[in-house]
Image: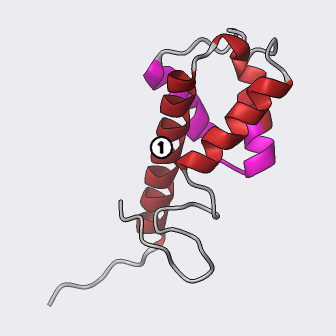
Amino acid sequence: MSQETRAGGVRQGDVAGIDADGLLKELTTLQHLSPRKPLGQVVSQLVDRTGVCPVAVERALGWLGLDASRSVGRLRRGELSQLSRAIHRFWVRALAAEAKQDQPAQPHP
């Protein structure tokens, strides 16, 4: 994905102005504020705070094999980074597939 900045300071590949680094920042903040909360509750808060697709979050958790009942404070920085990037990747792919379905069929000459 290109990381060139568009007008308004939003980089290409960002969804609603949120990139993987923005998701990581939110996850890190939530981890520091509530380290004993289960990861499942924290990602629910992430969905509420950022508008990220809940299906993308579930797919990312499953893909990484992270237990939603595990305390978020037990996750290392690398795990949070992987989670934020996976969430962003699944979110972008879901939006691209949705946009492709919404396009009318083009007749072939």
- Queried whether the magenta region covers residue 39, the answer comes back as no
Quadrant in the picture for residue 97: bottom left
Q: Residue furthest left?
A: 109
- Residue matched to label 1: 90
The image quarter containing residue 18 is: bottom right
Q: Eyeballing the image, is 32 above or below 8?
A: above
In the rendered view, tell whether residue 31 sits above or below residue 35: below
Residue pictured at 63% horizontal, 49% vertical: 22
Image x and y of residue 99, in percent: 47, 67
* Spot occupied by residue 90 in the image (x, y as percentages of width and height): 47, 43
Q: Position of residue 46 (x, y in %)?
A: 74, 38
The answer to whether residue 13 is above or below residue 32 is below
Region rendered in magenta: 46-64
Q: In the drawing, does residue 84 fall left or right of residue 71?
A: left
Identify which residue, 97 or 18, lies in the foreground: 18
Rendered image coloring scheme: secondary structure
Is residue 21 visible to us here? Answer: yes
Q: Residue at x 81, y 11 (%)?
A: 36
* Secondary structure under the numbered disc 1 in the rendered image: helix
Residue that lies at the very extreme toward the right in this rendered image = 33
Q: Residue at x 66, y 10 (%)?
A: 74
Please identify the dominant SS of the magenta region.
Answer: helix
> How many residues crowd mark 1 within 10 Å: few (<14), some (14–19), many (20+)?
some
Q: Is residue 71 above or below residue 50?
A: above
Residue pictured at 73% horizontal, 41% vertical: 47
Tag 1: amino acid = Phe
Quadrant location of the C terminus? bottom left
